[in-house]
Image (cartoon, rainbow, N blue to C red):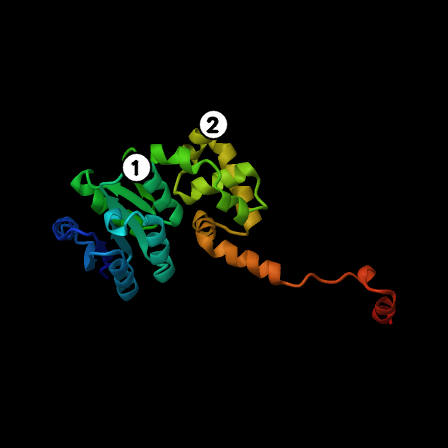
Amino acid sequence: MESARVSVVLADAQPVVRRGVAALLSKSSDIVVVAEAATGREAVRMSVLHRPDVLVLDTELLGGQVGTAVREVLRAAPGTAVLVFTATDDEDTVVSAVRAGARGYVLKSSADGGIVRAVTGLAAGETILGPGIADRLVPRIGSRSPRFQDMFPELTAREQEVLELVAAGMGNSVIAKQLHLSPKTIANHISVIFGKLHVTSRAEATELTRGDRRARLELVRRTPTPLRRDTFPPAARAIASS
């Protein structure tokens, strides 16, 4: 039985770029381009309409709002992996995209085969960062963001750092190098994080960092705390004991 091809939506402001990327992807029999978009709004609409495996997104059509656009796509089409494919490699844009949930960031200056490998990798559940991107990203991601401190108060400062690097798609060896720890220590931290967050995989932990955790915290806050009898007024304690 033939396996299903990876479906892709291309979002780029330049028609010539869209045609060029579509031509590159069409060389792979495993990939099919199902739609194109020329604006951020169209990218969201096409993602909702076609539910592609991968959205290839250029930052230039987002007006500097890459983080907002990525989050909007993931809210509207949570099963779609976002691959940022752009000429922009400034650190703020990279960090904003990855923290918002983009699973890939590849520069247009990369080799022709890079976009094909990135698309198939994201569809398989991988995180793909182009050459040099990971080295520049790790130091910025590795410093705890206020959002992580707010969302995961049960984690220690070190565990929050590790979780953020995990959510950015970093492997244990890369995290260990960044934090100057051994891979075994990182593995132990991740095991503790999984236990505290009640998850069983890196994917589940990463999903919590995308916003679901906040909803769970609100649910916990709204859950009534069981009343202890010794806090009742005397008359109520007598009734409870009867």
Q: Can you say which quadrant of the picture contains the C terminus? A: bottom right
Q: Residue at x 54, y 47 (%)?
A: 150
Describe residue 227's horizontal placement relative to residue 11 as left or right: right
> Which residue position is annotated with label 1?
90
Amino acid type at circle 2 is His
Which SS class for mark 1?
loop
The furthest residue to the front: 63
Describe residue 242's horizontal placement relative to residue 105 as left or right: right
Other residues around mark 1 within 10 Å, as few (<14) / some (14–19) / many (≥20)? few
- Image coordinates of residue 180 in percent, x first then y, are 47, 27
Q: Residue at x 50, y 50 (%)?
A: 200
* Vertical arrangement, residue 43 with respect to residue 83, above or below: below
* Vertical arrangement, residue 85 with respect to residue 38, above or below: above
Q: CA distance from mark 1 to mark 2?
A: 25 Å
- Image coordinates of residue 164 in percent, x first then y, are 45, 42
Amino acid type at circle 1 is Asp
Task: Tell us which disc is closer to us: 1 or 2.
Answer: 1
Describe residue 124's horizontal placement relative to residue 205 as left or right: left
Residue 233's disc number: none
- Image coordinates of residue 66 in percent, x first then y, are 32, 49
> Which residue position is annotated with label 2?
180
Residue 220 position by quadrant: bottom right
* Vertical arrangement, residue 8 with respect to residue 154, above or below: below
Residue 86 position by quadrant: top left
The furthest residue to the top: 180
Q: Residue at x 56, y 56 (%)?
A: 217
- Image coordinates of residue 15 in percent, x first then y, are 13, 53
